[in-house]
Image: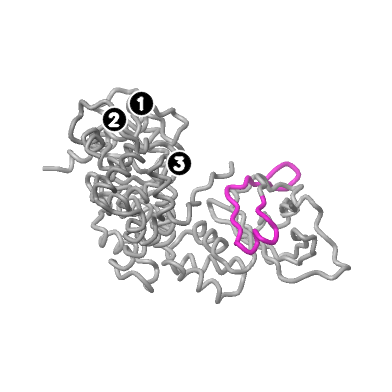
């Protein structure tokens, strides 16, 4: 299922978050250090990662012995849904260490965002001792703020964007930058497209499913577009890439990657454009990156209209 | 002005609570600040037009960031402003499909009120366990 928006903020709120993230990078003297020194950022924020936290099986089992079975079912369900927690009363975070290190870096910075944003910390310190909660739209906003804090800190403001601008457009660029900054391929591919000055589009797909007849399909997890792409083509809203979809030739069925493949399609004004599409798959996702390369001549052949770029 | 302050903090018996807008207006008057002065002190984060609408109840759901900035300027309690804005309802009022908000988590799926409550108890247990 396509994931809901996890990052859009009003400009003033984004400014407030980025100002806090900038301070955190300053405190840790983290600018220009690669991979981004996440543990230094945590230390400078006086925040610790619980050594035997809530994801520690022995702690869980010891606790489970004392609890009724119904409560344990609910707790087990809760832990399975959660990847990170910020304990505002102890100034400590719990991170699921079964996930990959690059993803842990993002999780740590997300929880650091809750700690470094005074608007969050003061509220979360309150809830342990009272039966109140955050109004759901504000809880959503806080999560999006923590995501933007993590994004700004991990990619060191505009450093990622500036380095991406100097690299050859293609799927290898976010992969290389992800390694350099210590980010997951997923976070890096998203940042690459969202911040790129050129027109480009990225699909993050769920792992592919091979179907009868030898084809494949994959549900869309998230779509990112650059600002230029959105202006020219709009924002696609596909939920599935299957054999009928014009982008299906990009699915890396045999190999880990699909080499740059020519695609033709029209922008909002009906102008034909030649694009390249590439793909890369990890254990968790398939990434498709598409970017226009030049205008077409009148003799070019277009990919059928099933390519679901918005035409309005 | 006095009644507003009393209703908020000093006299819990007071039944008529001011609205967020009334409270902010009363505090600003008490601090003898103009709308423009607040705008300047907030580095233009809170414009005079915005604050005016907030005080007159034309804006009912300001961002927590705006409330925190105003709390800093007026030297008042941010949590109290969040309360007046209606952002801190009773936990039992939340429906299972609404975003959980008592503990900050990075979660792929929303927690039900029961799951959230159990998780909070477990966190409390982990805190006491590590203490000598």
Pinpoint the chain carrying mark 2.
A
Image position of A123 (left or right of A275)? left
Q: CA distance from mark 2 to mark 3?
A: 30 Å
The image quarter containing residue A131 is top left
Kindly state the secondary structure of the residue where label 1 is placed.
helix
Which chain letter goes with mark 3? B
Tell me the distance, in whole angstroms, between the alpha carbons under discs 1 and 2: 8 Å
Asked whether, in this view, residue B84 is left or right of residue A267, the answer is left
Task: Residue A192: give x, y in percent of width and height.
Answer: 54, 64
Bin the neighbour count of mark 1 within 10 Å (Cα to Cα): few under 14, some 14-19, many 20 and up.
Answer: few
- Which is in the foreground here, disc 1 or disc 3? 3
Marks 1 & 3 on one chain: yes
- Is there a contact, CB below 8 Å, between mark 1 and mark 2? yes
**Percent x, y of residue A3:** 55, 45
Numbered mark located on residue A245 in the image: none
Say which element carries label 3.
Answer: loop
Q: Residue at the bottom extreme?
A: A166
**Which residue was labeled with disc 3?**
B58
Q: Is B126 or B68 nearer to us in this picture?
A: B68
Q: Position of residue A222 (x, y in %)?
A: 58, 50
> What chain does mark 1 sit on?
B
Where are the magenta residues, as a range? A210-236
Q: Which residue is mark 1?
A: B92
Examine the rendered structure and indicate whether residue A252 appears above or below residue A56: below
> Distance between the Cα atoms at labels 1 and 3?
29 Å
Q: Which residue is mark 2?
A: A131
Q: Residue at x 21, y 35 (%)?
A: B6
The reply, left or right, for residue B101 in relation to residue A167 is left
Which percent across, then down, holds residue A179? 46, 66
């Amino acid at each position: 299922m396509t994931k809901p928006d996890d990052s859009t903020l009003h400009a003033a709120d984004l400014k407030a978050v980025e100002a806090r993230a900038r301070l955190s990078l300053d405190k840790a003297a983290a600018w220009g250090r690669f991979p981004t020194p996440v543990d230094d950022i945590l230390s400078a924020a006086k925040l610790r990662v619980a050594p035997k936290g809530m994801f520690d099986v022995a702690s869980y089992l010891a606790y489970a012995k004392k609890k009724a079975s119904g409560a344990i079912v609910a707790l087990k369900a809760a832990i399975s849904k959660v990847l990170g927690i910020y304990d505002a009363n102890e100034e400590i975070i719990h991170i699921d260490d079964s996930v990959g290190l690059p993803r842990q870096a993002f999780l740590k910075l997300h929880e650091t965002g809750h700690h470094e944003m005074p608007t969050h910390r003061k509220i979360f310190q309150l809830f342990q001792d009272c039966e109140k909660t955050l109004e759901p739209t504000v809880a959503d906003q806080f999560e999006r703020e923590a995501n933007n804090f993590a994004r700004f800190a991990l990619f060191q403001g505009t450093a990622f964007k500036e380095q991406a601008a100097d690299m050859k457009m293609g799927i290898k660029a976010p992969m290389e930058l992800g390694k350099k900054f210590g980010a997951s391929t997923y976070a890096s591919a998203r940042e690459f497209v969202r911040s790129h000055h050129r027109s480009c589009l990225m699909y993050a797909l769920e792992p592919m499913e091979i179907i009868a007849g030898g084809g494949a399909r994959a549900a869309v997890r998230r779509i990112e577009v650059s600002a230029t792409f959105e202006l020219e083509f709009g924002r696609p809203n596909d939920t599935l890439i299957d054999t009928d979809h014009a982008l299906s030739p990009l699915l890396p069925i045999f190999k880990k990657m699909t080499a740059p493949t020519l695609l033709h399609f029209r922008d909002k004004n009906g102008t034909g454009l030649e694009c390249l599409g590439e793909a890369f798959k990890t254990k968790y996702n398939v990434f498709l990156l598409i970017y226009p390369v030049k205008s077409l001549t009148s003799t070019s052949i277009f990919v059928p209209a099933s390519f679901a770029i918005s035409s309005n | 002005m006095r009644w507003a302050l009393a209703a908020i903090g000093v006299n819990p018996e007071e039944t008529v609570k001011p609205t967020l807008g009334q409270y902010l207006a009363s505090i600003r008057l008490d601090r003898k600040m103009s709308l423009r002065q607040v705008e300047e002190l907030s580095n233009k984060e809170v414009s005079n037009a915005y604050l005016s609408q907030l005080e007159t109840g034309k804006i009912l759901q300001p961002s927590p960031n705006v409330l925190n900035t105003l709390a800093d300027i007026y030297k008042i309690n941010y949590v109290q402003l969040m309360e007046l804005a209606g952002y801190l309802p009773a936990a039992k009022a939340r429906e299972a499909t609404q975003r959980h908000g008592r503990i900050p988590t990075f979660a792929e799926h929303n927690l039900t009120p029961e799951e959230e409550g159990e998780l909070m108890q477990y966190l409390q247990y982990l805190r006491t366990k590590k203490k000598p």
